[in-house]
Image: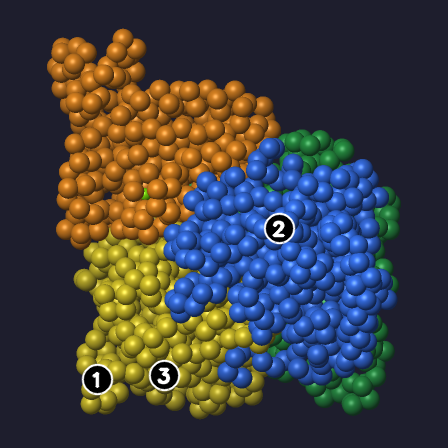
Chain colours: A yellow, B orange, C blue, D green
């Protein structure tokens, strides 16, 4: 990351920069979504685009998620790249026919590429409740023909969004709402991070923690803490969940022999299940302990802060799984960093309402 | 003032007073939520109905307790107008165990089945087919209930709306679709979402359903239209679609004003504020009978007090146990 | 015969002959598919267009090679009318490597991008927004292409249809929606799916789009309407919606007749068969110029021969390697 | 199954009987779907219902999958049970907003039950192609609040459909098209099979094969064959994939120490992944070999019979996995029953077109 032109930027700014960069490189590319041109610009990510690229390339849309996804596909098969955005993944459940029956299968069936990127924001906290908080990325990862990206840093967000946009396939690009204000050094201009490559965000030789999106933040907190107690966790950020970088995971397991797979979605049927299944199938003899998983419980996310206390996967849960796996002392387990107060916001910058 | 002419002998003071009470209650609850939201204790996305009280307040006087209603993210007014418990609504906004969903839903999920208010959903258009299903149930059970479905102008863009109207007409279901056209979906004006000069109710009429259009800020006019259409829907003639013009005063979601964002002009806002359904109805009442002024002062005090108590109730209620989050996912648990 | 009066001086023999050729080609291909389907070599769900050739055949003469088209499960006629390769279509039905999708799609997935035929989808309503997207692309690129979207009367019930029309109108896109109303969706008559007496084109008109209705079994009348609406759509005036009445002769899916199922009456069927667009046009031609009879005999022979060769080609083509199934899931593989 | 009143019936007849039975027991229950009252009655499953129960309780519908799902939910919260049917699961992608955002969460949020059953038929063979053949049950199994049933026999179909209908929760009832003509002895009248209970369809002590729906047929073929060679496979029919009967699976593994998980859907993110993951987590020390999976490949299903040759999971694939797991001889592996000709129909009864 020692790029000379790199500057400290938020995740939101990174997304915005990637969009500007892509629309500059490809003068036909379009960008639309509910609120794409409104004064808030989808949490700031699309601000300024309409001014720079004009009303025909950047536009708001009717509340018609299904048809508007089909519109992107239709334009794509005539060579128009697009980025469409939905402020919550939950709204996009209306558009799955177009995504799965058309976009994902078009190249396979007709041999014509569908270069669309669909940005979905996954909500959490501040009472978002059952239908504004779903992390259903496992669904997308189940569908042949889709690529699915889940960046955890501003840096990755920019590099992966640019790669997604210029990928000839439909890409679902998932932004965790709690990452929008996170900051990292991000290069100016065009730079790409390959889709399908995981990143070792912390090397270690005792346990492999496989993680994605916001949970990388918690994994790092846990790993930093455990490191102080002599447990060296290797934190792998998947970055892309379809395709998954299996060689990177297998290689890490070959050195650690232990796996904890995290997931921001419901446990049953999670991407973490696929990770555990494949690792077990491929690295069975290398495993020193039963693999473990941590994910959201198999219940809808309730709204009340009284009910979401302790609901999310946090560093202390991660520590406790690793303690159990390694038979570490109770003190280590109990000393782990706990859920901050208030627990339902990503930081002081977040004042609601969504 | 243009609406003076409407004050004729038909003006029913008793009904007008009831409607006034509804408006005043909704307005005051919403204003108090707006005032207290920045305290950070109501931790959920919250969409206020201030400025849009005319339609629900008049509707309230036209439907029966056992009629059904469903609504949207902006559902406080409809919930209260149907007679939903104020304590349970505020409890829900505060995330308390006394909330109508025991804190599971927040502001966008309100329910009070004891008064036929069956729920609000946070996905635009999502509750429309549910309302149609409730009407189907009423038809099957041969009750004379009707099902009222509140929706915004944005929801008209969802395919589910169109599918729902079609089915309601095919099966002649006792549905009343009530579209509150407040010109915006979040910060997006109608012009970027629907054809210029399209008239929503005319379009819907062509689907094969009876429709009316009315001024949503004229509560007594709303009452007239509602009375007729409720009668139709209840008579077995099939569904009815109503569109009312109205305007949201505050920001789309949250407690503030947001005209400074320039997605709408200050002038437009002021024009609509002059059409305030509360002031309008009060003027009508006082024109009819000047002694009502004193009565309203009284009533206001009672309502204000009720609201204060409800906020106190909600604030003092306990949170649900965190462990409750993991229970009752299934109805047979 | 009612249609005699239409044979006026405007009747353009050259155009009529072209349209006749299209109808005859489609009819004959479909009949031969029907004949050979029971052999069990075309192993995919197949929906024939026999009886419905009038609309696609006339449309064919109104659009340009680079105009776009998308269609549905019942897409053979549209594919052929747009000039799609017959060999590649039959290859696809036979599941051969020479098929337009190399056997991946079958009858419900036809494509020939060299003539702007962009695809057909097997999900009702699914290709409608795609066609709108193609029109958006044409508008962005400032070409003068139009995008033609074929749909059935059943597809009008999908929310996606309504959402698509709305967006096409909002952005004034060069779209031609062409609804072939054959009265049925599978075995379900309109009466169980749409309001009695609803007129589809009138309903759609109220969405803010220009519309026309025509007799789909009168190819020359279709040609007139098409010519005008194509011109409108191409001129930048925005989208156009056309509804044509027509009738499917054979079973919904498969090769047989199915009147014995009694979902429709033999009488209805016979009435529609009398409206056969092929016979009608032939009669019009012969009335105009009796010497055409001999010319058509010639043309028929040529077309029949072409079709025989295409079937032979498809039957003799090899299957794709089984291993191909696992390749090219992604465009960058 | 030695029920005195049991008679040999097809899967289709069983479904029909269950519907008749349920509508008789609950005089308010409704049943609808595209073609529910047409002369073919959804592959025969709804034939006669309209005559028996009248037009207001049994009806056809507009092609409006999304709203019509919402209609069922609305009626359900007023106490009306319903069974709605879609001739292909693929069409139901249009209705996922209603299923996931409303039906699955309604009881959790509002405390009011949603007693709806949604029958989805999963196509296969005879060129169904990319959008008439999807087995996306893993999606449903990922959603809290849903129950998901996948019967493999006529017997189970009836007993489970009755339980599904009278369950107070939304149930997705998945019928594999290749099972519609399969026959078993099925009791007359009302009988229920509990949701959430797996069945040992063949006991054995060497390998546990976890299976569901049509794959139980192939698993049995493989197990019969292997038995002749002295390998005793225990075949477990999940019958319900949400909830999954974990105790039954763990108990079987405790005796066999070996797992092969089958799935009729795409491999990545399959229910088989969840099975392998959970078994590994819970039975790690009991496993004698790395668990294995067999599922549909991560590609869309093509239409051509040339392309679907060898595409489906068949007895010989199952045998070969077990041979590899157990180091059995090449002869055993190669002698397994192979894919029948023609391979794209379930039997001679199937003459197309869908
Ligand atoms: C399917 C879906 N799309 C988008 C949203 C985001 N959203 C929340 S409220 C809203 C505005 C809807 O406008 P309208 O129906 O006119 O209701 P209003 O807010 O004006 O009362 C939108 C788009 C959503 N909740 N659901
Ligand atoms: C979303 C969806 N629902 C149901 C079906 C099953 N289906 C296949 S063709 C068809 C009939 C559609 O009727 P219409 O649009 O009038 O076309 P037609 O067959 O009459 O040409 C139906 C319902 C489907 N393919 N997709
Ligand atoms: Mg609005
Ligand atoms: Mg039709």
Instruction: Judge from the rendering whether residue D152 lies leftward or rightward of residue A305; answer left or right.
Output: right
Tag 3–tag 1 contact (CB < 8 Å): no
Whether pointer 1 and pointer 2 mark residues with C-beta atoms closer than 8 Å, the reply is no
Q: Nearer the viewer, residue C154 or A295?
A: C154
Give coordinates of residue D139: x percent, y percent.
55, 61
Residue A31 image point, x, y percent? 35, 66
Q: CA distance from mark 1 to mark 2?
A: 71 Å
Question: Which residue is painted at 38% across and 55% down in the image?
Answer: C171
Task: Work out whether disc 2 and disc 3 sit on a shared chain.
Answer: no
What residue would you read off at disc 1?
A6
Q: Characterize the local packing of mark 1: few (<14), some (14-19) or many (20 or more) Cα atoms within 10 angstroms.
A: some
The label nearer to you, 2 versus 3, is 2
Q: Chain of mark 3?
A: A
* Residue B33 to residue B19: above or below: below
Residue named by callout 2: C10
Image quadrant occupied by the C terminus of chain D: bottom right
Mark 1: which secondary structure? loop
Q: Which element type, helix, strand or loop, lies under badge 2? A: loop
Tell me if residue A190 can be seen: yes
- Of label 3 and label 1, which has the lower sequence position? 1
The residue labelled by disc 3 is: A193
State how far apart marks 3 and 1 are (Cα).
15 Å
Counting the numbered discs, the total is 3
Cα–Cα gap, marks 2 and 3: 64 Å
Considering the numbered disc 3 on the image, is that residue within a helix, a strand or a loop? loop
């Amino acid at each position: 990351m020692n790029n000379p032109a790199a500057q400290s930027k938020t995740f939101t700014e990174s997304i915005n920069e990637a969009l500007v960069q892509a629309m500059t490189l490809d003068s036909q590319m379009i960008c639309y979504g509910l609120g794409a041109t409104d004064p808030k610009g989808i949490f700031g990510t699309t601000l300024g685009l309409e001014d720079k690229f004009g009303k025909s390339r950047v536009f708001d849309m009717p509340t018609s998620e299904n048809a508007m996804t089909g519109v992107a596909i239709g334009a794509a098969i005539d060579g128009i790249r697009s980025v469409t955005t939905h402020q919550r993944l939950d709204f996009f459940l209306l558009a799955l026919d177009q995504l799965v029956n058309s976009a994902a299968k078009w190249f396979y069936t007709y041999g014509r590429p569908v270069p669309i990127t669909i940005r979905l924001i996954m909500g959490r906290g501040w009472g978002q409740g059952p239908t504004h908080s779903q992390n259903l990325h496992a669904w997308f990862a189940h569908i042949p023909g889709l690529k699915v990206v889940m960046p955890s840093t501003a840096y990755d967000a920019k590099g992966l969004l640019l790669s997604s946009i210029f990928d000839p396939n439909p890409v679902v690009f998932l932004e965790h709402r709690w990452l929008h204000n996170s900051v990292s050094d991000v290069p100016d201009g065009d730079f790409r991070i390959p889709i399908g490559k995981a990143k070792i965000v912390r090397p270690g030789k005792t346990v492999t923690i496989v993680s994605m999106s916001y949970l990388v933040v918690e994994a790092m907190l846990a790993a930093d803490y455990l490191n102080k107690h002599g447990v060296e966790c290797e934190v792998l950020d998947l970055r892309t969940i379809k395709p998954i970088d299996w060689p990177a995971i297998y290689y890490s397991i070959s050195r650690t022999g232990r796996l904890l797979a995290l997931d921001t979605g419901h446990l049953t049927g999670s991407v973490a299940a696929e990770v555990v299944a494949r690792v077990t199938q491929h690295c069975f003899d290398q495993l020193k302990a039963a693999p473990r998983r941590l994910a959201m419980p198999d219940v809808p996310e309730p709204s009340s802060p009284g009910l979401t206390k302790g609901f999310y996967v946090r560093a202390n849960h991660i520590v406790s799984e690793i303690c159990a796996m390694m038979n570490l002392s109770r003190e280590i387990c109990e000393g782990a960093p706990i859920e901050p107060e208030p627990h339902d916001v990503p930081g002081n910058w977040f004042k609601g309402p969504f | 003032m243009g609406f003076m002419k409407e004050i004729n002998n038909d003006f029913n003071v008793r009904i007008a007073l009831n409607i006034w009470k509804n408006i005043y209650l909704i307005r005051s609850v919403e204003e108090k939520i707006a005032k207290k939201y920045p305290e950070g204790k109501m931790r959920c996305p919250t969409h206020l109905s201030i400025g849009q009280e005319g339609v629900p307040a008049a509707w309230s006087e036209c439907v029966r307790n056992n009629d059904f209603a469903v609504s949207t993210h902006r559902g406080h007014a409809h919930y209260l107008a149907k007679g939903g418990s104020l304590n349970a609504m505020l409890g829900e906004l505060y995330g308390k165990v006394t909330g109508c969903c025991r804190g599971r839903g927040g502001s966008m999920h309100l329910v009070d089945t004891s008064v036929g208010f069956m729920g609000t959903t946070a996905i635009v258009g999502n509750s429309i087919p549910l309302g149609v299903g409730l009407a189907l149930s009423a038809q099957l059970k041969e009750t004379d209930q009707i099902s009222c479905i509140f929706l915004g102008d944005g929801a008209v863009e969802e395919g589910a709306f169109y599918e729902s109207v079609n089915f309601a007409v095919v099966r002649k279901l006792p549905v009343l679709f009530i579209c509150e056209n407040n010109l915006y979906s979040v910060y997006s004006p109608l012009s970027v979402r629907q054809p210029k000069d399209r008239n929503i109710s005319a379009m819907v009429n062509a689907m094969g359903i009876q429709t009316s259009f009315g001024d949503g800020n004229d509560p007594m006019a709303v009452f007239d239209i509602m009375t007729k259409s409720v009668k139709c829907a209840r008579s077995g003639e099939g569904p009815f679609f109503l569109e009312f013009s109205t305007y949201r005063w505050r920001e789309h979601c949250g407690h503030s004003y947001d005209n400074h964002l320039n997605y709408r002009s200050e002038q437009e806002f002021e024009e609509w504020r002059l059409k305030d359904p509360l002031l309008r109805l009060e003027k009508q009442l006082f024109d009819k009978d000047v002694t009502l002024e004193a009565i309203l002062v009284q009533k206001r005090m009672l309502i204000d007090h009720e609201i204060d108590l409800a906020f106190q109730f909600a604030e003092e209620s306990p949170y649900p146990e965190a462990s409750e989050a993991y229970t009752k996912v299934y109805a047979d648990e």
